[in-house]
Image (cartoon, helix red, strand yellow):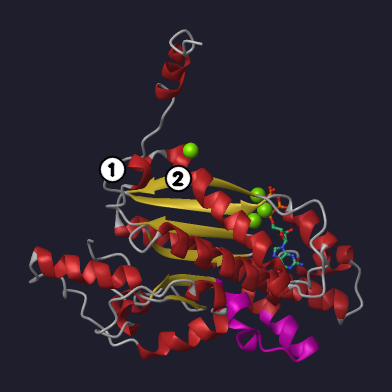
């Protein structure tokens, strides 16, 4: 049958395609759908489940590997969400929004489900299966990107301090959720710190870094040996977050201006090396300047 009779419907599609603004940082944030319910059904520990957060991190690392080295520059995860910052020169799918968002959501979800048994070995994944939504926002400047990430990390801190206090009052303090909520109403950070310390002997600053700071995922350029040029297929599937974290220590630090005096071909060589650098997971402060000054390739380098 001739197809020409039907082909006109293609034009309906083209008029709807959104190409995200060129030369801007695209941030795609995915978020677990109804994870309040999902975390209850799967009996996640409260307020934080290290297995669940590690699984989120592993799925995020898989997004880096699946998309290749020159697409995502950094990702930040907390609770049931992950934000992926795409390089401003990224031209994947001609920057079509629907393709980018749906692909990231799909890769993330596929790995979250397939890696589930590794993080919850004694717990079958039952229905409803975990699903995620996603959205993309363009940010024109590095300052905007840093402020976005600071916003998420500050949110992590505020929520975690509240949740840690809330669940301590219930689990150790014998309060009902209503009583705990009332107890915390109107309290400032220092009050919550004091409640944790005086009633439960907990120094909030000694709580797990992953819970307090969230998870930062990026390619550790500094850790790549100069001789490493060949591909290392499938390494990502085997590597645990713990193993990846260990390698992040070795970073020799290129200065922030390192790219300035370089020829384009030198920059291209470095871009190739960066694309193969190991993906690491860290639980560190990304609000202050120090993190960024030591890792200029994440936002300052052009590939
Ligand atoms: P949504 O995103 O509008 O579809 O709805 P939710 O229910 O996913 O809401 P959201 O994303 O604002 O909040 C995330 C929920 O996931 C929140 O109820 C707490 C839960 N959750 C995330 N991580 C953990 C964890 O490590 N342990 C426990 N117990 N719950 C967690
Ligand atoms: Mg939500
Ligand atoms: Mg959610
Ligand atoms: Mg959420
Ligand atoms: Mg196809």
Mark seen at residue 22: 1
Residue sitting at 47 percent across and 51 percent down? 28
Residue range (magenta)? 193-214
Q: How many marks?
A: 2
Residue sitting at 78 percent across and 69 percent down? 44
Front-most of residues 302 and 196: 302
Which of the 4 quarters of the picture holds residue 143?
A: bottom left
Q: Is residue 48 visible?
A: no
Residue pointed to by mark 2: 100
- Outermost residue to the top: 5
Q: Quadrant of the C terminus?
A: bottom left
Residue 101 % position (x, y): 49, 45
Taking 189 as reference, is 77 above or below it?
above
Residue 174 % position (x, y): 92, 77
Label 2: state its secondary structure.
helix
Residue sitting at 28 percent across and 88 percent down? 252
Mark seen at residue 165: none
């Amino acid at each position: 049958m001739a197809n020409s009779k039907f082909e006109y419907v293609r034009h309906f599609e083209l008029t709807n395609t959104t190409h995200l603004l060129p030369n801007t940082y695209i941030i795609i944030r995915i978020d677990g759908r109804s994870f309040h319910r999902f975390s209850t059904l799967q009996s996640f520990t409260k307020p934080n489940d290290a297995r669940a957060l590690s699984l989120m991190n592993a799925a995020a690392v898989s997004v880096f590997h699946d998309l290749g080295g020159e697409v995502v520059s950094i990702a930040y995860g907390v609770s049931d969400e992950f934000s992926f910052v795409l390089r401003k020169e990224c031209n994947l799918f001609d920057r079509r929004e629907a393709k980018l968002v749906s692909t990231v959501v799909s890769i993330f979800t596929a790995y979250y489900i397939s890696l589930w048994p590794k993080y919850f070995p004694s717990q079958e994944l039952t229905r409803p299966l975990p699903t995620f939504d996603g959205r993309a926002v363009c940010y024109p400047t590095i300052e905007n990107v840093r402020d976005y990430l600071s916003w998420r990390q500050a949110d992590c801190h505020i929520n975690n301090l509240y949740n840690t206090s809330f669940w301590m009052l219930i689990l150790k303090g014998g309060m009902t959720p209503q009583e705990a909520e009332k107890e915390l109403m109107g309290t400032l950070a220092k009050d919550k710190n004091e409640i944790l310390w005086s009633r439960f002997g907990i120094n909030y600053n000694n709580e797990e870094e992953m819970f307090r700071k969230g998870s930062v995922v990026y390619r550790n350029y500094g850790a790549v040996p100069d001789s490493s040029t060949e591909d290392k297929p499938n390494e990502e599937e085997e590597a645990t977050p713990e193993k990846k974290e260990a390698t992040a220590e070795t970073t020799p630090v290129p200065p922030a201006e390192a790219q300035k005096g370089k020829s384009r071909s030198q920059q291209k060589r470095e871009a190739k090396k960066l694309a193969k650098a190991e993906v690491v997971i860290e639980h560190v402060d990304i609000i202050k300047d120090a993190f960024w000054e030591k890792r200029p390739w994440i936002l300052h380098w052009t590939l």
